[in-house]
Amino acid sequence: MSFNNLDQLYRQVIMDHYKNPRNKGAIEDGSVTVDMNNPTCGDRIHLTMNVENGVVTDAKFEGEGCSISMASASMMTQAIKGKNIEDAVKLSQVFSDMMLGNDYPDDVDLDDIEALQGVAKFPARIKCATLSWKAMEKGLQNQK
């Protein structure tokens, strides 16, 4: 597949998550609630998660922001459901490495998240893509 076709496919994946977000909403009585914003561009997220026996059993988000921010939140909530806290945080670290243009392990299945790798070329947009991931890390840090 040519670079242009791959780039177009990635854009389609991002726009699909933006226009049809997965896990949009809030969990009533969620065991973890985090509010974060990116003051430089106005993105904001309200993340709720249920964590039971060290496993993220559910995750939902509300917020507003650019397509990258909201698509990333949609992808992140999909990716962490069913993962234990350690694996969710590890995935966040892999995502952060990808956003910074660093190498990351080949054995980690990023699925749709890989579509965001092009954001690394636009430093001003990295904070947009990582906002929900930072919220997730913040929420899980006291759940161990």
Image (cartoon, helix red, strand yellow):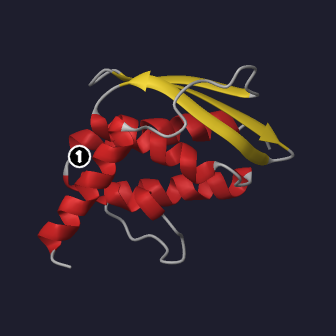
Among all residues in the image, which is located at the extreme left? 4
Tell me which corner region of the image, top left, top right, bottom left or bottom right, holds residue 19. Answer: top left
Query: Along the horizontal axis of the image, is 96 left or right of 31?
Result: left
Task: Report whether residue 137 is seen.
Answer: yes
The reply to whether residue 97 is visible in this rendering is no
Q: Position of residue 120 (x, y in %)?
A: 27, 55
Q: Amino acid at mark 1?
A: Pro
- What crowding class fits label 1: few (fewer than 14 Cα within 10 Å), some (14-19), or many (20 or more)? few
Residue name at image x 81 percent, y 47 percent: 54
Q: Is residue 13 left or right of residue 73?
A: left
Helix, strand or loop at mark 1:
helix
Residue appearing at x 51%, y 31% in the figure:
24
Query: Can you give x and y, in whole percent of width and height, for residue 23 in the image?
Result: 55, 36
Instruction: Residue at 28% x, 31% y: name it.
Output: 66
Q: Residue at x 19, y 63 (%)?
A: 7
Quadrant holding the N terminus = bottom left
Indicate the quadrant containing the C terminus: top left, top right, bottom left or bottom right: top right
Q: Nearer the viewer, residue 51 or 40?
A: 51
Left or right placement of residue 36 versus residue 57 in this view: left
Q: Position of residue 111 (x, y in %)?
A: 46, 63
Q: Quadrant of residue 68?
A: top left
Relative depth, front residue between 52 and 14? 14
Q: How many marks?
A: 1
Q: Is residue 71 above or below residue 31?
A: below
Residue 95 percent across, percent down from the top left: 45, 56
The residue wearing badge 1 is 123
